[in-house]
Image: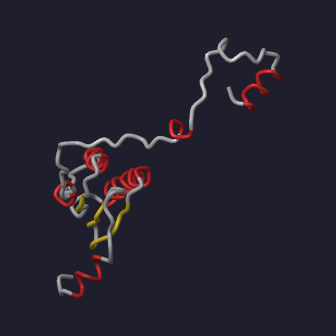
Amino acid sequence: MGKITSKLLNAMGFSGEDDDYGFEEMDSTEMYQEPPVFTSSKKNKVIDINATTRFNVVIIQPDDFNEAKEIADHLKERRPVVINLELLEKEVAHKVFDFLSGAVYALGGSIQRVSNHIYLIAPYNVNIMGDFRDELKNKGIL
């Protein structure tokens, strides 16, 4: 047994006999062995990330306030939604928009106005870049 181990055992009140405790001395080659290297016979697979990130854009023209929940469900499923509120009465359209604004806020998404009464509502996983209204004006659509 090494000197340090003997001194430590003596300091703790144990006798310095080597064989009673089952301690064995290790040489430096046993203490610092390289970890085993594991190899696999399987080949690495490459997955195209772009193929897995496809999503659908939902276009809805609600007839009444009850369809606002359906639109919010699409957002919960991380689908962007374009809503057209032109056919709704002004008060109902305002209620639908307020409801969806709260849903978008709660889900961490965003809303952008495309034109009068038409909005793009995007969940948190979809970024809206640019201003659609400016794009449509520049292309002569609005």
Whether residue 100 sits left or right of residue 25 in the image: it is: left
Q: Residue 87: x percent and y percent? A: 21, 60
Which residue is at the front of the view, 50 or 95?
A: 50
Residue at the extreme top of the image, as rendered: 20
Which residue is at the front of the view, 128 or 72?
A: 128
Residue drawn at (54%, 37%), measured in percent from left and top?
A: 31
Which residue is at the front of the view, 44 or 54?
A: 44
Q: Residue 136: x percent and y percent? A: 22, 81
Figure colour scheme: secondary structure
Residue drawn at (65%, 14%), measured in percent from left and top?
A: 19
Residue drawn at (44%, 50%), measured in percent from left and top?
A: 106
Q: For residue 48, which quarter of the picture? A: bottom left
Q: For residue 70, which quarter of the picture? A: top left
Q: Residue 63: x percent and y percent? A: 20, 52
Q: Residue 91: x percent and y percent? A: 35, 57
Which residue is at the front of the view, 91 or 131?
A: 131
Instruction: Examine the rendering and report whether any part of residue 20 can be seen.
Output: yes
Instruction: Examine the rendering and report whether any part of residue 58 can be seen.
Output: no
Q: For residue 21, which quarter of the picture? A: top right
The quadrant in which the C terminus is found is: bottom left
The quadrant in which the N terminus is found is: top right
Whether residue 17 sits left or right of residue 128 in the image: it is: right
Question: How many discs mark residues in the rendered view?
Answer: 0
Q: Is residue 88 above or below residue 5?
A: below
Q: Is residue 22 above or below residue 61?
A: above
